[in-house]
Image (cartoon, rainbow, N blue to C red):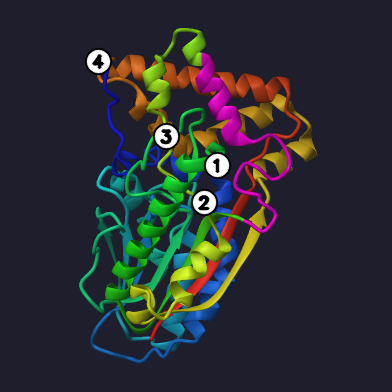
Amino acid sequence: MTPRNMMGSRIAMKGEGYYSLHTRGAKHVIDNTTELALGALEEMTIDEADTSFAIADFGAADGGTSLDLVGNLIAEVRKRVPNRCITVTYTDLPRNDYSALFQVVHGEREDVTSYLPQHDRVWVFAAGTSFYTAVFPPQSVDFGFSATAMHWLSRVPGTITDHVHAVGACGEELERYRLYAMTDWETILTERARELKHGARLVMSNFCVDEQGYHIGNTGGVNMFDTFNELWRAFVDDGLITEQEYQSTNFPQYYKTLDEYCAPFQDPKSIVYRMGLRLDSAQTRIVPCPYRTSYLEHGDATRFAESFVPTTRSWSETVFLSALDNTRSAHERHQIVDHLYDRYVERVKTHPDGHAMDYVHVYMVVRKE
């Protein structure tokens, strides 16, 4: 039996607006980045020009979580150059739900308020191109932004024998992921270095392992990825999936440390440094899980479980779907994955203490010399 796909490029966020509706924490991370982004913009020289001021959101999903940040950037640029045209390009993988994205940006969703009707001379585009390749022409981007996206690897580096994620790997298997992630990071930065104009800024907030060893879903309580692994492993014991399907389930992710994120900028011999990218600031921060915070106030375990688990599903579902054998029908695959999240909900309802998806990020401001 053959897994349907092992490539990270086949992974996508859950569509039809599900992502932004169920990832309040991801939006809080971006809101937490706004001050850094506006500060970086303030350091830039922006003049009236015939060319447009180009903003890029790398790994935008359905665009809902970054809506306020992009609106703030546009408002600030408009204050400084009232007559200059502005473009916003949302980038993501080809499988992304761009219909949902344009509904969000054009204000066709009742649950969000878009910046677009508030401004004239603003043009919105989308690029279904991976940030592991060139997305824009050389020296064409004024301001780049990315949040909670660049921890995804370009492909799965290898099998993790007894776990589904690199945070549960060790020895040679962990080192394989680390080396692959460092190569991927250099590729991402090299492509951005080509695209950014001289004097441009790139602001990023990416998942990391912080100085305390914390990472998303593991900040002192129940480890979220251990939970995923235990539930999925039990499916083998119950005969719901095969051993090979379990072994084929590997998140194409790696959470780098602060030092690993900063390394390409600190080595004058690295291609990233030689291409002119410089690190202005880098720091780790933790944004508390909003669903856990609400639970501590209302105390309803069922309500907590039924809001918390969907936020984990919004970005993890396709990993489990892609691991299931291609001889299974689409209906059967979705039934299995639905059952996985149902079990997760039941576990949290029964034992809510310790479950949380705190967001552990490194926040970086980069400039192009």
Viewer-closest of 14 and 2: 2
Secondary structure state at the residue bearing disc 1: helix
Give the crowd class for mark 2: few <14, some 14-19, many >=20 residues within 10 Å. many
- Residue receiving disc 4: 327
Disc nearer the start of the sequence (4/3): 3
Outermost residue, front direction?
A: 172
Viewer-closest of 100 and 175: 175
Measure the alpha-carbon separation of dots 4 and 1. 30 Å
The amino acid sitting under disc 2 is Tyr
> Where residue 187 sits: x, y (%)?
32, 62
Q: Residue at x 69, y 22 (%)?
A: 349
Q: Label for residue 255?
A: 2
> Where residue 257 sits: x, y (%)?
56, 58
Measure the alpha-carbon separation of dots 4 and 2. 33 Å
State whether residue 55 is above or below residue 280.
above
The amino acid sitting under disc 1 is Val
Is residue 263 part of the magenta span, yes or no?
no
Disc nearer the start of the sequence (1/2): 1
Q: Residue at x 67, y 39 (%)?
A: 356
Is residue 220 part of the magenta span, yes or no?
yes
Q: Is residue 355 left or right of residue 126?
A: right
Q: Residue at x 55, y 21 (%)?
A: 231
Measure the alpha-carbon separation of dots 3 and 2. 14 Å
- Residue receiving disc 3: 250
